[in-house]
Image (spheres, grey):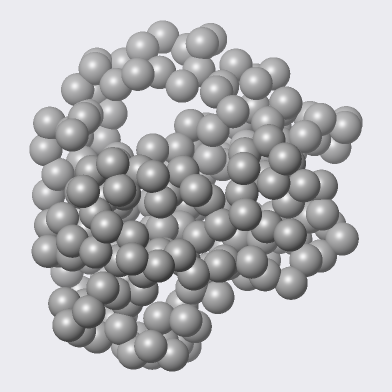
Amino acid sequence: MPFASVRKVADADLPTRWGHFRILGFEGVIDNPESCNNTLPPSSQRVETAVALVMGDIHAAPPIVRIHSQCLTGDVFHSLRCDCRQQLELALATIADAGAGILLYENQEGRGIGLMAKLQAYELQDQGRDTIEANLELGFAADCRHYELPAEVLKLLNVPAVRLITNNPEKVEALEAVGIHVTQRISAEVAPEPTFEKYLQTKREKMGHLVS
Ligand SMILES: [Zn+2]
């Protein structure tokens, strides 16, 4: 693993509109991380954090799991530039219906480029660039997300196999690559809105996401 260490830093109760979860905080430290932006100097260490919302018995069978990347604009403000909020709600509802599951929420805003850069990317998108072109123009890779931390969290939770809610084949590959078996892929497709039609088109055509 790329991490020098991964540890659980908190474990608390979290009642929600979808039911009762535990909320667990995790912190991973990476030494000499690869930079995702060719205009910024490399750093000697990066700390990544993620939370896990855990409901029910996650060990009786491969649990339903969603790896969600933080999206302030979508998750908090219900933005319709992207489908993040709808996917988050879909995941929580699916877990609640099953009575068990794990939502892994990664603190990597804007596909890992950070909130301010994501807003700058929005500006470029308003001028006609798609999501990938905008990230590249700001000096970033097309997608700066890593899925190693959620994989390590699943290992710490003793979960060797999952039923993964995703449209993103990279997430399936990332888990399989570290030995976490994806026994089933559950679609994360949500009702489309005209405001994120182009966003979904780019995901499908340039990132290989499985959306119709
Ligand atoms: Zn979003």
Residue pictured at 24% horizontal, 85% vertical: 56
Quadrant into which the C terminus falls: bottom right
* Residue that protrudes farthest toward the front in the picture: 183
At a point 17% along the width and 83% down the height, the residue shown is 60
Where is residue 51 shown, x and y percent of the image? Answer: 30, 59
Above or below for 101 versus 38 = below
Q: Going by the image, does 212 lie left or right of 146?
A: right
Asked which quadrant contains residue 110, the reply is: top right
Residue 159: % across, % down? 18, 65
The number of callouts visible is 0
Which of the pair 47/203 is nearer the observer? 203
Q: Decide which of 122, 154 is in the foreground and name it.
A: 154
Find residue 108 and report its horizontal and vertical position in percent: 44, 43
* Residue 103 location (% of width, % of height): 37, 67
In the rendered image, which quarter contains the N terminus? top left
- Look at the picture and state if 147 lies above or below 189: above
Residue 103 visible at all: no
Q: Residue at x 51, y 11 (%)?
A: 38
Q: Is residue 176 left or right of residue 198?
A: left
Residue sitting at x 53%, y 10%: 39
Does residue 60 appear in this view? yes
Kindly indicate the quadrant of the structure image that contains residue 163: bottom left
